[in-house]
Amino acid sequence: MSTIAVIGVGNILFCDDGVGVYAARYLETNYDFEPTIDIIDGGTLGFNLMRYFSDYDQVIILDTLSIDETAGTIYHLPSDTLLGLGENRKTVHEVEVTQMVELASLMGVRASISVLGIIPSDIQTVAMDLSPIVKKHFGAFIQTLLGVLKEAGVSATQKDHATSLGAIVQGSYRFIL
């Protein structure tokens, strides 16, 4: 049986930059998965995430994507497509994710790596929240991920008592204080 890790990356202090972390926490709080997957809050760990590429068969990174598209647009990119996007990274963790994927391909790691990304509206404002545009598309972001997992043979069951995105964001304050 293959092992799957979903890793949310980003900095929750800079508005939409934290969408990957919020999405990982949202999934962990609101869904059960069969077979079990590991959901990891990768935050801004950067190169320390590299070990997951060797530990799992499939790694899905949740993040923002800095490409010239409309904010809220969602992409699921396999690692080879991500590498083809060039040097147009706007955040430190985007650079590190791309560099980790490059290094993983050179090292021949076993994981199939992809990025599920959303185009941010605001990654510069210091705010522990998401922009209205990214909030509007957050549900579609989660549904896209659930579709990717379904294709990988993982079924998701929503828990009886759902926690809202707003509560997830509010709960993130405790990680900072």
Image (cartoon, rainbow, N blue to C red):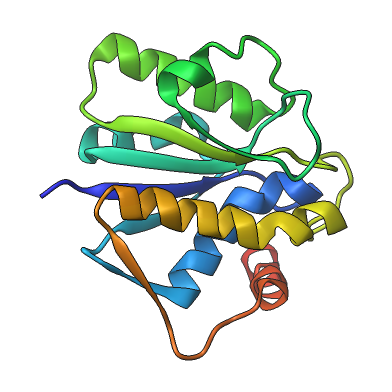
Residue at 76% in and 41% down: 120
Q: Report which quarter residue 150 is drawn in.
A: bottom left
Q: Find residue 154 and report its horizontal and vertical position in percent.
A: 28, 58
| Depth order, front residue of 117/127 | 117
Give the residue at x 24% y 32%. Answer: 54
Relative to residue 36, is residue 129 drawn left or right?
A: right
Q: Is residue 168 left or right of residue 5?
A: right
Q: Residue furthest right?
A: 125
Q: In the displayed structure, would residue 116 be above or below residue 91?
A: below
Q: Residue furthest left?
A: 1
In the picture, measured across the screen, residue 95 lies left or right of residue 71, that is left
Could one spot residue 149 in this view of the protein? yes
Q: Position of residue 77 (x, y in %)?
A: 50, 30
Q: Residue at (72%, 38%) from the top-left corner?
A: 119
Label count reads 0
29 left or right of 171 in image = left
Q: Is residue 50 visible?
A: no
Q: Quadrant of residue 57?
A: top left
Residue 70 percent across, percent down from the top left: 81, 35
In the image, residue 21 lies at what x, y percent?
A: 58, 54
Q: Quadrant of the C terminus?
A: bottom right
For image coordinates 39% across by 57% down, the residue present is 39
Q: Nearer the viewer, residue 85 or 96?
A: 85
Look at the picture and state if 32 lies above or below 55. below
